[in-house]
Image: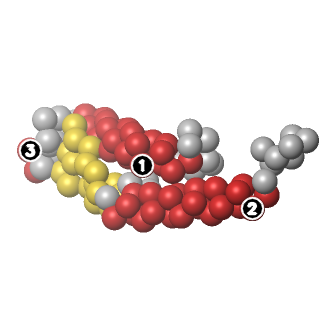
Amino acid sequence: MRPGGQPNMQQLMKQAQKMQQQVAQAQAELAEAELTGTAGGGLVTVTVTGLGEFKAVKIDPKAVDADDVETLEDLVLAAIHNAAEAQRELAEQKMGPATGGLSLPGF
């Protein structure tokens, strides 16, 4: 800070620009990352990007039972939750340093 308690605006702008660049880099890394969530010992696998976009669902034919659709639904939901948790953890890991611990909406 300058004498009189006023922050140096030029320094603040440089810090903001650096933070913006770090956030952009982290977002690019997240967009490229693919994470998987599984359930039922691998019977159901869900793939999601680091930004939270779901890309694929794979279901092993052994998980398909016409008389027990409810179990398959539970497995799909569990795999989605597993993938979403992996995505949240990665986003936290990548965005935390870029934002200096600030919480940004959507990340």
Measured as percent of width and height from the top left, residue 32 is found at 34, 64
Q: Quadrant of residue 9?
A: bottom right
| Amino acid type of the residue tagged 3 in the rendering | Lys
Q: How far is the residue under mark 2 from the one under mark 1?
A: 27 Å
Tell me: 62 left or right of 90: left
| Amino acid type of the residue tagged 2 in the rendering | Gln
Are there few (<14), some (14-19), or many (20+) residues within 10 Å of tag 1?
A: many
Q: Which residue is mark 3?
A: 62
Measured as percent of width and height from the top left, residue 5 is found at 87, 40
Residue 13 shows which numbered tag?
none
The answer to whether residue 18 shows anywhere in this view is yes
Measured as percent of width and height from the top left, residue 7 is found at 81, 48
The local secondary structure at tag 3 comes to helix
Dot 1 or dot 3, earlier in sequence: 3
Q: Which residue is mark 2?
A: 10
Q: Quadrant of residue 28?
A: bottom left
Residue beneath the point at 38% across and 61% down: 29
Dot 2 or dot 3, earlier in sequence: 2
- The answer to whether marks 2 and 1 mark residues whose Cβ atoms lie closer than 8 Å is no
| Amino acid type of the residue tagged 1 in the rendering | Lys
Dot 2 or dot 1, earlier in sequence: 2
The local secondary structure at tag 2 comes to helix
Q: Which one is in front in this view, the residue at disc 2 or the one at disc 1?
A: 2
Residue beneath the point at 78% across and 54% down: 8
The answer to whether residue 77 shows anywhere in this view is no
Residue 94 shows which numbered tag?
1
Q: Which one is in front in this view, the residue at disc 1 or the one at disc 3?
A: 1
The local secondary structure at tag 1 comes to helix
When the figure is inspected, residue 51 is found, relative to residue 41, above or below; the finding is below
Measured as percent of width and height from the top left, residue 98 is found at 51, 50
